[in-house]
Image (spheres, rainbow, N blue to C red):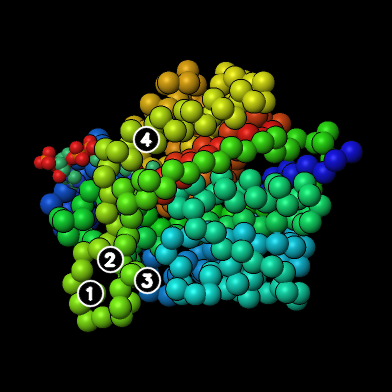
């Protein structure tokens, strides 16, 4: 019997500090009504001094380990992803490896796939487990957006959407008769790389860091929101149909969909286009905003803890993000 991959446990962490839309009104020309209407976000979490991408990742990973009654040494590979890392290099995967207290030098990989980071990471972990190379893999997405947003009116189209948080998942080898990950579909279209981007500091600049840099607005995220929105809806629908179709399934077979948490209207349109009832999903966007790679593990974790997703359910994860990159995973939990 060939090895397959199953989800063992999940964990999540969000900082204590709640930042409401009302608070954002004091930094920029925006309103609670505009933000809620356009995105579905009511509040988000921001780190306080001392909290980092790594510290949140550690908290989420520890929860996943505890829930599975595992120790760090029971893990034999780490896949980590974030946009904003503790250091420019090395990646945060090795910091997580250090903080979790491994007694052995397990490999740690950092991936950079923005909002679709989690579906990419899960696909990769599944392939490694199925190949027999690693038996149990820890995947963590952790994001500190709040320290690098343009909190003036100039940056309001982006800054109101993002929040800080971390999500973790442990996967391990199982036999093919157990509920497992069936398949993943991944895509990218680099011609849209500049549609949602932070371009500075850049390897194009000589020197890379200069006195002028702090005045350059290219250090902040820039986005063509409408183009992102349109492509997110189209691509998330397409990739779910592609993934289900090649596994001889249809949208109505799904018990639950965990979609990336960028915008409530994006997810409503995707579900309605595929004829999937809204009860078959869960949202954390209203409370945590967009935490990029962390949204899927956070939302999945919450839905499982609330009993909305049960063992044996057929579940799809789907995400779209900067790059453009997008993808989906199909699994029986
Ligand atoms: N508060 C108040 N007004 C604002 C704000 C704000 N925070 N931001 C923009 N506006 C203004 C604009 O300036 C514009 O004013 P104008 O008509 O005078 O020019 C007006 O609101 C409408 O702006 P639009 O861009 O047309 O608003 P839209 O309905 O497209 O919503 C939004 C903007 C929410 C950004 C939407 O396009 C969106 O969600 N796009 C997807 C973006 C996304 O999710 N990115 C995350 C990363 S990728 C991913 O995760 C999928």
How would you rate the neighbour count of disc 3 (Cα within 10 Å): few for under 14, some for 14-19, many for 20 or more? few
CA gap, disc 2 and disc 3: 13 Å
Whether the residues at callouts 1 and 4 have beta carbons within 8 Å, the answer is no
Whether the residues at callouts 1 and 2 have beta carbons within 8 Å, the answer is yes
How would you rate the neighbour count of disc 1 (Cα within 10 Å): few for under 14, some for 14-19, many for 20 or more? few
Q: Position of residue 248 (x, y in %)?
A: 67, 21
Return the residue nearer the eye: 216 or 34.
Answer: 216
Task: Give the labeled residue for mark 4.
Answer: 231
Return the residue nearer the eye: 77 or 64.
Answer: 77
Q: Earlier in the sequence, mark 1 or mark 3?
A: 3
Task: Give the labeled residue for mark 2.
Answer: 219
Q: Position of residue 329 (x, y in %)?
A: 60, 38
Mark 2 vs mark 3: give the one in front: 3
Placement of 71 over or under 320, stated as above or below: below
Q: Secondary structure at mark 4?
A: helix
Mark 3 vs mark 4: give the one in front: 3
Placement of 80 over or under 285, stated as above or below: below
Q: Which mark is residue 74?
A: none
Task: Give the labeled residue for mark 1.
Answer: 214
- Which residue is located at x 70 percent, y 38 percent? 181
Whether the residues at callouts 3 and 4 have beta carbons within 8 Å, the answer is no
């Amino acid at each position: 019997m060939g090895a397959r991959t199953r989800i063992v446990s999940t964990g999540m962490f969000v900082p204590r500090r709640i930042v409401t839309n009302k608070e954002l009104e004091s930094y920029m020309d925006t309103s609670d009504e505009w933000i809620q209407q356009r995105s579905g976000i009511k509040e988000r979490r921001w780190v306080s001094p001392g909290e980092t991408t790594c510290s949140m990742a550690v908290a989420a990973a520890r929860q996943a380990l505890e829930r599975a009654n595992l120790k760090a040494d029971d893990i034999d590979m780490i896949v980590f992803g974030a946009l904003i890392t503790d250091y420019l290099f090395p990646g945060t995967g090795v910091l997580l490896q250090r903080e979790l207290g491994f007694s052995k030098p397990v490999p740690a990989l950092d991936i950079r796939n923005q909002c679709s980071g989690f579906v990419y990471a899960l696909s990769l972990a599944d392939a490694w487990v199925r190949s027999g190379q690693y038996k149990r893999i820890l995947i963590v997405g952790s994001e500190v957006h709040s320290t690098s947003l343009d909190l003036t009116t100039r940056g309001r189209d982006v800054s109101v959407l993002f929040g800080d948080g971390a999500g973790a998942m442990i996967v391990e080898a199982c036999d093919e008769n157990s509920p497992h990950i069936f398949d993943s579909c991944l895509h990218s279209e680099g011609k849209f790389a500049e549609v949602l981007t932070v371009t500075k500091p850049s390897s194009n600049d000589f020197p890379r860091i200069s006195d002028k840099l702090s005045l350059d607005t290219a250090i902040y995220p820039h986005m063509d929101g409408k183009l992102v929105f349109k492509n997110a809806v189209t691509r998330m629908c397409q990739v779910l149909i592609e993934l289900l179709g090649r596994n001889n399934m249809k949208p109505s077979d799904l018990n639950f969909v965990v979609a990336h948490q960028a915008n409530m209207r994006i997810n409503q349109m995707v579900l309605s286009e595929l004829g999937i009832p809204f009860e078959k999903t869960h949202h954390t966007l209203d409370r945590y905003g967009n935490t990029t790679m962390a949204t899927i593990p956070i939302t999945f974790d919450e839905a499982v803890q609330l009993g909305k997703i049960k063992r044996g359910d057929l579940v799809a994860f789907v995400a779209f993000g900067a790059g453009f990159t997008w993808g989906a995973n199909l699994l029986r939990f």
